Image (cartoon, coloured by chain):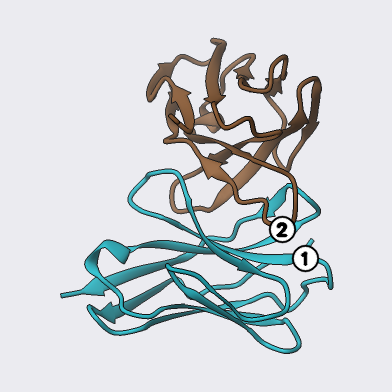
Chain colours: A brown, B cyan
């Protein structure tokens, strides 16, 4: 299993540009989440999904859109990038239940100029 | 939502036990405590979790106080590869994790 994969690894955008961060998992996990991590900080939840076709907002959803058309994929869209969105983005997946161990991807480092 | 408080940093000698404390004084009765670690800037890695009872696995032990207001992660024989940021996290509901800023553990040779 590849686990959770994210592309790209690095990205530089100009203010106002849009882009999509890709996340895929091959573990047939129902739950998928997006987090951002700012320098010296912990992770903050952006959006999450409990299954195909179902998404919801986390702590910091503004400026981001998500959709979940398949179990495997959970892309994160930045509609109009802002410097405040400069961060490292992590995708995670898990299965429901009391264990609910999350498996994280390697991250995408995004810089918005 | 429950929040956690951890020391900013700790040092531990290689081969000794590393005891990482966490305060979660506002935790609710059905909220689990999870521990993850992050090595360099990689994605966080699951270590252990618990609700009320102490837990042990191949990586670590988790001691939760009887009132559940604090817990301690124990790495029994720390190695240089255990140098990382350790996050004590409260899970709210089924899928919402609240991360703090974590403890930066440095294992010294």
Q: Badge 2 is on which residue?
A: B91
Which mark identifies residue A63? none
The quadrant in which the N terminus of chain A is found is top left
The secondary structure type at the circle numbered 1 is loop
Mark 1 surroundings within 10 Å by alpha-carbon count, few (fewer than 14), some (14 through 19), many (20 or more): some
Circle 2/circle 1 CB separation < 8 Å = yes
- Cα distance in 3D space between marks 2 and 1: 6 Å
Q: Badge 1 is on which residue?
A: B31
A33 left or right of B35 in image: right
Q: Quadrant of residue A62?
A: top right
Vertical placement of residue A92 versus A81, above or below: below
Q: At 44% across and 34% down in the image, what residue appears? A: A107
The secondary structure type at the circle numbered 2 is strand
Q: Are marks 2 and 1 on the same chain?
A: yes
The quadrant in which the C terminus of chain A is found is top left
Front-most of residues B65 and B56: B56
A98 left or right of B64 in image: right
A53 left or right of A80 in image: right
Vertical placement of residue B71 versus B8, above or below: below
Whole-percent x and y of residue B106? Answer: 29, 70
Front-most of residues B40 and B14: B14
Give the mark nearest the N terminus, 2 or 1.
1
């Amino acid at each position: 299993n590849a686990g959770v994969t994210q592309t790209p690894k690095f990205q530089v955008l100009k203010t106002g540009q849009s882009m999509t961060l890709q996340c895929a998992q091959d573990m047939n996990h129902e739950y998928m989440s997006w987090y951002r991590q700012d320098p010296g900080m912990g992770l903050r939840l952006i959006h999450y999904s409990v299954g195909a076709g179902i998404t919801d907002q986390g702590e910091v959803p503004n400026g981001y859109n998500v959709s979940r058309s398949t179990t495997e994929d959970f892309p994160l869209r930045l509609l109009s990038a802002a410097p405040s969105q400069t961060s490292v983005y992590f995708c995670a997946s898990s299965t429901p239940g009391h264990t609910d161990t999350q498996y994280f991807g390697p991250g995408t480092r995004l810089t918005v100029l | 939502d429950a929040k956690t408080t951890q020391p900013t940093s700790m040092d531990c000698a290689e081969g000794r036990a590393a005891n990482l404390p966490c305060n979660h004084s506002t935790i609710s009765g059905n909220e689990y405590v999870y521990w993850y670690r992050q090595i360099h800037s990689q994605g966080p890695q699951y270590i252990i979790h618990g609700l009320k009872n102490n837990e042990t696995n191949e990586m670590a032990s988790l001691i939760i106080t009887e009132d559940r207001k604090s817990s301690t992660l124990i790495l029994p024989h720390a190695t240089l590869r255990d140098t990382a940021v350790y996050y004590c996290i409260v899970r709210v509901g089924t899928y919402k994790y609240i991360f703090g800023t974590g403890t930066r553990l440095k294992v010294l040779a």
